[in-house]
Image (tube, grey):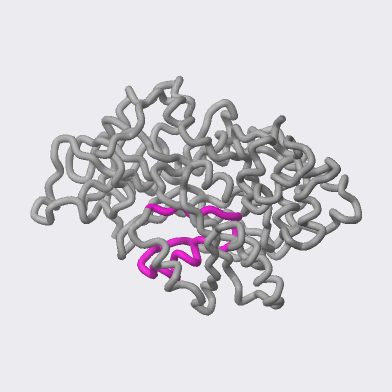
Amino acid sequence: MATRQEKIWQHIREDAALREARKQTKKTPKEERVRQRGWTATFAEDPESYYDLDIADRERVMPKGETEARRGTAPVSPLHSGLGLDVRTRSDPAQADTVPEQSQGTVVEVSSGLCRVTVGSRLLLCSLRNSLRTPHSGFSNVVAAGDAVLVSHNGHDRGLVEAVLPRRSALARPDSFYPHLQQVIVANVDQVLIVASWREPAFWPELVDRYLIAAARHNLAPTLCINKIDLADDPAALNAVVQAYEQAGCRVILTSAVNGTGLAVLRETLQGRTTALAGLSGVGKSSLLRAAEPGLNLKVSEVSDRRHEGRHTTTQVSLHPLDGGGFVADTPGIREFGLSGLRRPDLARFYPEIAAEADACTYANCTHTREPGCAVKQAVRTGRMPAMRYDSYRKILRDLPE
C-alpha cells in the first residue's frame, strides 16, 4: 500500500502533467521545419550545397560562467565541490535517523514547486522558501536536479529549502514557454555521457558534435557511447565512425543493452562521478541504465515504427544514486540542441583535426568553406580528415552568428 508521502508526490506529478497538457493546447501551432540528420559526402561535387541548411536554434547549453553571472553568485568554494560523491556515505550511520536543524543536501528530483532532497541517508520531500523565487534570476526554475541546497527539517520526511548553493556547472536551455528565461536541466555534473544509437534512430553526427562542443565549453569530460551495436550490419562503417572520434580525442565506448556488450566498461565510467546522460530520444539511455544498474526502476518505450524515433520516455530529470557511488542524471531526449553564445570564428577550435590543418590555410581568417587555398578542404579531399566531421562543422557553422 502506498504511503501518504508517495500519494502526495503522485498527486503532484499528475497535477503537473495536467498543466503541461493545458499549455500545449494553448500553443499556436507552428510549421515544423525539416532538419537533415544524416550526412552525405557531396563536398567535392557541390561545395555550396552545405549552405542549403535549416537548423533551428531551440535548445542550448549555457556557456561556462554565465550561470553565476546571471544569478549574481560568487564562484563556488571548495566546501561545495564534493557533489560527485554519493551523499549516502557522507553522514555518520549512527546519526542516519536524525537531520540537523539546517543541513546540506542534494536535490535528486524536482516537480511543481517541490523537490526531493537527500540529506545523509534520508530522503526529504521539500518545499521552497518564497524568498528564493526571485523574478529576476534569469531562470524559470529555482532549483534543479543536482543542486546543492541547505534545508531545514520541518517534520517526518519533510523539509524546506532555505538556500541554493553556488553551482560549479549547469546544463541549461531556453524555457519552452518563456523563451527569455533559461531552464536548468541538471546542475553540478562532472561528466557528460553522450548516448547515440547506431540504428533506430540512426547515428546523427551533428548532434553528437554539438554535445561535444557543449561539454568542452563547460570543461566537462565527455564520453561518446554508441549504443545498439547489435544492429550494426556494416562493421567497417561503425569502425570508421569510432576512429574519427577517437582521433579527435574523444573516448568512445560501444554498448548494447540487448546482448550486454560494453556494460562493464559503462559501469566503470559512471562509478564515483555525477554524470549527465545526453542524447536523442529513443537511443536507449534508460535501457542502458537499467542494464548497468538493475536496481534502477526506469521506464522504457519502443521506438516509433513510423518515424524511427524515440517517444520521450523520460519527461523530467531525476538524479539516481548508483550502488558503486556517484549519481546519474537521466535527461529528457533533446531533438534540437543549440550553442548559446558561440560565434563562427570560435567553432574551429572545438574540432582538433580542423585546428591542426588551419595553420596552412592561405588566409588567417579562413572559415574553411569557400576560400581558395584552404588546407582544411584539401585534407578532406585527400582523406586526411573525416568527411563526416567536416560535414558537421559546416552545418553548425551555418547556424552560428557572425
Between 82 and 307, the one nearer to me in the picture: 82
147 left or right, relative to 226 = left
Q: Residue furthest top?
A: 136
Q: How many marks?
A: 0
**Span colored in magenta:** 274-299
In the picture, residue 227 is in which quadrant? Answer: bottom right
Q: Position of residue 183 (x, y in %)?
A: 50, 35
Q: Residue furthest left?
A: 94
Q: Which residue is depicted at the point 64% across and 49% down?
A: 351
Q: Is residue 283 visible?
A: yes
Q: Is residue 154 magenta?
A: no
Residue 180: give x, y in percent of width and height.
Answer: 57, 26
- Is residue 196 shown left or right of residue 68? right
Q: From this view, report whether residue 44 is shown above or below residue 197.
A: above
Which residue corresponds to the image point at 51% horizontal and 76% vertical from the top-left? 261
Q: Position of residue 396 (x, y in %)?
A: 70, 44
Q: Is residue 75 above or below residue 119?
A: above
Q: Quadrant of the N terminus?
A: bottom left
Residue closer to the observer: 297 or 260: 260
Q: Is residue 291 magenta?
A: yes
